Amino acid sequence: MKLAVFSAKPYDKVYLTQAAELAPDTGSNIEIIYHEFVLSSETVSLAAGASAVCVFVNDTLTEDVLTSLHSLGVRAILLRCAGYNNVDLKTASQLGLFVANVPAYSPEAVAEFAVALVQTLNRNTHRAYNRVREANFALDGLLGRTLHGKTVGIIGTGKIGVAFARIMQGFGCELLAHDPFPNPEFKKYGEYTTLENLLSRADVVSLHCPLLPPTRHIINESTLGMMKKNAMLVNTSRGGLIDTKAVIAALKKQQLGGLALDVYEHESAFFYNDHSGTIIEDDDLMRLTTFHNVLVCGHQAFFTEEALGEIAGATIRNLTDFVHGRECQNSLVQLTKEQGAAPITRGRSDTIPIRI
Ligand code: NAI
């Protein structure tokens, strides 16, 4: 079994190699080929000889790429992430490709990072760090707001949204949520409401829903207009949830009080690589980095030792389920018996994935 891993970083190599060695029923039978570049129509030919590919958030698996993979003999797509908006699941299903993700790996890792963004942006610790290194101990410009008693709005109350709610409740915040599929777990922490009501009341709005056609640009000129003046918006989910130009306009008008992003609409051209010696041509990204009340990180919310271990372990388990024709809890496409797949049973949050 040859597995071609795309967008492979040094840490991916460490954790995936270790997980493959530890896999009880395939072990050394998995030969892993690591490619540092993304999977796209330009690079797909490098999957030749592999039966499975392993991809990450910025690899693009369009109809063309999937068709090429299939004709090269690839039969399994392993996403080493939770989101799967970058995979054309309909085409994958038609081609009979096995596709599995890692739906739950330390949701706390992402939730904790969202809290870190809120805290950093609110209390300006990033600016304080730089000032103090230059012996500037002035407090002007570092004024924050006490979170205790503030209202936090959570859009999407799956695993990460609920983990975020649990932490924010500890801060003494009032919690509101919007989700078309309410999660009984959230009801311990706060109340569900409409998107409009949430936006008009929340001091902090945090996005934790997946990127799907109905959620693309869920934050746009109209919904930004509904937000409480001076509120903070946090996105650790997917860049496409926010209309970047609309958010820049809201920041310029001083309608939006702060923006913390771990993800960016057009991140695939930049994130996970060092562009410090090149000219960045994305004017929206560059504009965002000039606001004093905007914090941009490079899609690192998942990046903890625990999460990397869990991601690698689950990815290799998905692969071994495929190899042995076993039922795979993390399958994203329903294949027929003739297509070589075991039946799929999914949990609560997986009532939605086939919305393509
Ligand atoms: P999940 O599947 O457990 O929860 C997603 C929730 O969003 C569900 O409750 C669903 O009903 C809800 N939802 C769907 N449509 C909605 C809508 N229109 N409005 C409001 N809610 C809606 O997913 P999980 O594990 O909590 O992850 C959430 C997202 O976080 C993922 O889709 C992924 O894009 C992102 N993520 C980001 C990471 C990072 O490193 N920045 C790492 C892992 C995930």
Image (cartoon, grey):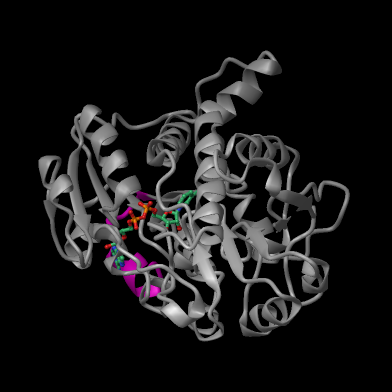
Residue shown at 33%/32% (left/top)?
Answer: 145
Q: Can you tell which quarter of the image residue 112 is in?
A: top left
> Which of the pair 308/207 is nearer the observer?
308
Task: Give coordinates of residue 31: x percent, y percent.
Answer: 75, 50
Q: Position of residue 163 (x, y in %)?
A: 30, 39
Between 329 and 111, the residue placed more toward the observer is 329
Q: Residue at point 69% right, 49% down?
A: 30
Please give the name of the residue rendered at 13% of the width and 51% of the height, measured from the top-left corner. Answer: 184
Is 225 magenta? The answer is yes
- Residue 241: within the magenta? no
Residue drawn at x 25%, y 41% is 165
- Total labels drawn: 0
Where does residue 75 sit, x and y in percent of width and height? 62, 71
Of the four image quadrants, the one with ligand 1 is: bottom left
To which quarter of the image does residue 351 belong? Answer: bottom left
| Residue 141 shows in the view | no
Relative height, residue 278 to residue 77 (above, below)? above
Image spot of residue 7 (x, y percent): 72, 55
Up-down relation of residue 283 to residue 192 (above or below): below
Check the image and name the residue furthest to the right. 277
Which quadrant of the figure contains the N terminus?
Answer: bottom right
Which region shows up in magenta? 219-232
For residue 10, what is the image quadrant?
top right
Q: Is residue 165 above or below residue 321?
A: above
Question: Can you see residue 88?
Answer: yes
Judging depth in this view, the residue of 49 and 5 nearest the camera is 49
For residue 100, above or below residue 109: below
Image side of residue 4 versus residue 108, left or right: right
Please name whichever residue, 260 or 346, is drawn nearer the observer in this view of the structure.
346
Q: Is the C terminus in the top left, top right, bottom left or bottom right quadrant?
A: bottom left
